[in-house]
Amino acid sequence: METRKDRKRTDKFAAMREIWDKLISNCTTRYSPGEHTTIDEQLLGFRGRCPFRIYIANKPAKYGIKLIMVCDAKTNYMLNALPYPGKHTQPHGRALAHYVTTKLVALYASSKRNITGDNWFTSVPLVNDLLDNYNLTYVGTVRANKAQMPPEMIDKAAAH
């Protein structure tokens, strides 16, 4: 069995991993979500020492632990969540937002649910992946400067 020191080499979240996994297991198995879910991030204020604590200047609690969560849109119940691994993370060659979204919603594959997200999560490859491989639909805002945006969808007046 690996020690926490061994696990910390590959997992910044090692000190809390066992408890976190139990919490998420309970959240995913004890509740059946409605047809609409949301994905977003939340900064939990925390000033202690922690290898994954981050700073966001425009938040009320400027320091904390950032979580990416999928919640039931009607009740706000947290269905699944991951600690934010850092902005320079690109797991499996995909954009971080794409990776965490598919990881968090995989439990609901083939349920024909809808996921709603903001512009950090939204991309054409993600929407196609969710529809083709998970049988999920997606609604979200998208930035006009995203590389995958078709020119027909960009407001010409806003571009000038």
Image (cartoon, rainbow, N blue to C red):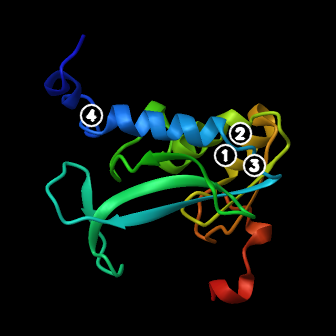
Percent x, y for residue 138?
76, 54
Residue corresponding to mark 1: 125
Residue corresponding to mark 2: 129
- Gap in angstroms between the C-alphas marked 1 and 4: 31 Å
In this rendering, would 52 be left or right of 153? left
Residue corresponding to mark 3: 33
Residue corresponding to mark 4: 14
Image: 135 above or below 158? above
Q: Quadrant of the C terminus?
A: bottom right
Kind of residue at badge 1 = Pro
* First reached walking from the N terminus: tag 1 or tag 3: 3
Percent x, y for residue 110?
82, 33
* First reached walking from the N terminus: tag 4 or tag 3: 4
Give the crowd class for mark 1: few <14, some 14-19, many >=20 residues within 10 Å: few
Secondary structure of the residue carrying tag 2 is helix
Secondary structure of the residue carrying tag 1 is helix
Kind of residue at badge 3 = Pro
Identified at 25% across, 28% down, the residue is 10
Identified at 31% across, 72% down, the residue is 56
Image: 44 above or below 20? below
* First reached walking from the N terminus: tag 4 or tag 2: 4
Identified at 29% across, 64% down, the residue is 64
Give the crowd class for mark 4: few <14, some 14-19, many >=20 residues within 10 Å: some
Percent x, y for residue 26?
56, 38
* First reached walking from the N terminus: tag 3 or tag 2: 3
Q: Nearer the viewer, residue 156 or 24?
A: 24
- Gap in angstroms between the C-alphas marked 4 and 2: 30 Å
